[in-house]
Image: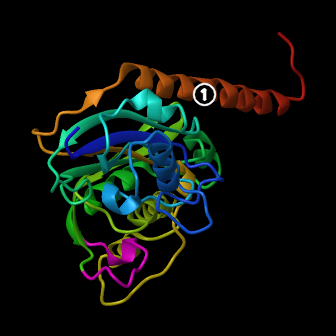
Amino acid sequence: MAKSKFLFKIYYIGKKKFYGSQRQPSFLTIEQSLLSALENRGYIRTLKNSEFEFASRTDRFVSARGACFTCILEKEPILMEINSVLPSEIGIWAYARVPLEFSSRFDAVLRHYVYIVSVPISHLQKTSGINIEMLKTACRQLEGRHDFLNFSKSERDVINTIRDMNFVTFSIHNDYLIFQFKSQSFLRQQIRRMVKKILDLGQGKMLYEDFIELFDTSKVISYQSADPEGLILWDIMYNEKIEFVEDLKSKERMNNFFSRKHLKFGLKSHLFRVLQQDNFSQ
């Protein structure tokens, strides 16, 4: 096979054993797991020659359904062959052949993130209270072009903190608040910090004037971001010339894994709900 580059779509679950997506010496990461699987099955020889590139880096405990990476392979990819040596928490489920100069990171046109708030909205309403209209106001305010310096973790190599936020919204599904964010690119911890301040405003922990003040970058405001476990890199989109081929067996592997975990943790959730009752009879 001639030298060819491929763009892959993957899922992963941000379990404690993975120290984020990016390669780190002496730590297990999503990237390292993928590289080991590709090398094990003879798809790459060396990291340098493979030009392996992740489209978006995520922190520890963050999950993904449609993360992407590019890689030059020694042979045509068979996804289930690669998946067979990956842990069940990671899987490749689609791919596309791309030009050698293609960049999974810089050629992305839109990134879509989903954030699930860990506490049921009914519990928030009983304790601190939650103002739905203020949540809507905050989401509207975040849309458009802004300097998100105060909504991100500072990084030395990032000079431009202006981003165009295409879409910010939320919905309530099965008693849980679910936020959605779409933009071509995001800053480090930007989504988790936006969620933190949206919730602070909705719960009355900060005034609207203080929320607006976060857009004033003449002063840097520091605070703790929202929990990473609720964050999902849902999808990364490219121009219409990129045509992904979904592998049915690999997608079935992914959905079966999600289904097993849903059943397992659904039982635990119901168990603790029942245990809270003083009397139980049917």
Q: Residue furthest right?
A: 279
Relative height, residue 178 to residue 202 (above, below): above
**Residue 116 visible in the picture:** no
Q: Is residue 151 magenta?
A: yes
Q: Give the quadrant of the C terminus.
A: top right
Q: Residue at (58%, 47%) from the top-left corner?
A: 118
Q: Where is residue 234 in the image (x, y as percent from the top left)?
A: 37, 43
How crowded is the residue under tag 1: few (<14 C-alpha within 10 Å), some, or many (20+)?
Answer: few
Q: Which residue lies furthest to the bottom in this view?
A: 218
In the displayed structure image, the side of residue 97 where residue 134 appears, left or right = right
Residue 71: give x, y in percent of width and height: 31, 50
Q: Looking at the figure, which quarter contains the N terminus?
A: top left
Residue positioned most to the left: 241
Front-most of residues 9 and 159 = 9
**Location of residue 107 by image quarter:** bottom left
Q: Where is residue 239 in the image (x, y as percent from the top left)?
A: 12, 44
> What residue lies at 33% left-to-right and 34% top-to-bottom?
77
User: In the figure, is residue 60 to the left or right of 233?
Assistant: right
By secondary structure, the bulk of the magenta-drawn segment is best described as loop
Q: In this view, does 174 lie above or below 99?
A: above
Q: In this view, does 276 lie to the left or right of 164?
A: right
Q: Is residue 119 visible?
A: yes
Q: Residue 5's spot in the image, x, y percent?
A: 23, 47
- The residue at 29%/35% (across/down) is 95
Amino acid at circle 1: His
Which color scheme does this rendered protein use? rainbow
Nearer to me, 211 or 53: 53
**Residues shaded magenta:** 147-159
Residue indicated by mark 1: 262
